[in-house]
Image (cartoon, rainbow, N blue to C red):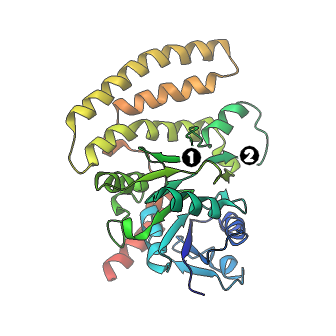
Amino acid sequence: MAPVVSIIIPTFRRPERAVEAARSALAQVCETAFEVVLIDNDPAGSALEALRALGDARVVVVHEPRAGVANARNAGLRASRGDTIAFLDDDELAPPAWLAQLLRVQREKKADVVFGPVRTKLAATPRHHEEYFSAFFARDPGHAEGIINIFYGCGCSLIRRAALPSAEPFSMERNEIGGEDDLLFQTMQAAGASFAWAPNAFVWETPETSRVTLAYTLRRAFAYGQGPATKAWTGPKRDLSAIAFWMAVGAGQTVIYGATALGSFLARTDRRAFAYRRFVEGVGKVLWFPMIKPRFYGAAKLTKSERAAEAKAALAA
């Protein structure tokens, strides 16, 4: 039976996580035929053996050796057959009703894209800031079910293929810095695409222990803070007034939350990490410039020799 939905799961050097995410996808209780497309984005193909060992006819395994988050997502789209695309990150676990809930909301609201909540499931209890980490990795703005006028990240989403602007819609310029999904949804919104929220279509985010640290989350917070001005810069029409607005907002937040963060640090308050995040996001709004964006993906995660080999292969191709 031809799949109607393709669940795409990219992974980079996390084979165990990818297998767990794939098993949760395969366990969906849904009357609609679906496939699970797994993309190993490691040039060395470190997850291929584990992914192929799943041994399910609904599984498609793809090796995309060109490291980069946009490359991986585009490779998944190329290999998928469904008219509808669901995205699940390799550190997310989908409950059995996840896909059915996304499809129901899409059908009832006639939306081009449907987003669902993300709930945090920590592997271990951190020594400090447990509440902060649980909130940081989660996504639940509390929308009622229905049409919304904003968009979120690709993980835990459902997209009508016909609404995509091209066959490979994720920008390769975002391979290392991320935000390739924001740029896509920004383009779709400008073209008139409709977005919806499905509050019952949630997934569990299971961050690696190495990411459950202030250093990692504050680096991500800085990147999140850069987001609004970046959207104004890369949109269909560059909006300099919006950039100036967000830089002014960021300057105010830097001053106000900087004082709050310092006071929280000196007093060692239980919620000081929340103040740190607000301060860092404010700084990110001011220092949003492309050349200083943190790099979390793609070539930034390769060794020097791996980057050289990838560049050589690209030239040969």
Q: CA distance from mark 1 to mark 2?
A: 27 Å
Name the spot of residue 44 as percent of width and height, x first: 55, 75
Q: Amino acid at mark 2?
A: Leu
Residue drawn 50% across the image and 37% down it: 221
Name the spot of residue 309 as percent of width and height, x first: 43, 74
Residue drawn 72% across the image and 59% down it: 95
Which residue in the structure is indicated by mark 2?
Answer: 122
The answer to whether mark 1 and mark 2 are in CB contact below 8 A is no
Q: Earlier in the sequence, mark 1 or mark 2?
A: 2
* Res. 174 image quadrant: bottom left
Asked if residue 109 lies left or right of residue 165, the reply is right
Element at badge 2?
loop
Residue drawn 42% across the image and 21% down it: 254
Which residue in the structure is indicated by mark 1?
Answer: 145
Element at badge 1?
loop
Residue 177 visible within the image? no
Name the spot of residue 116 as percent of width and height, x first: 58, 51
Asked if residue 128 lies left or right of residue 305, the reply is right
Q: Amino acid at mark 1?
A: Glu
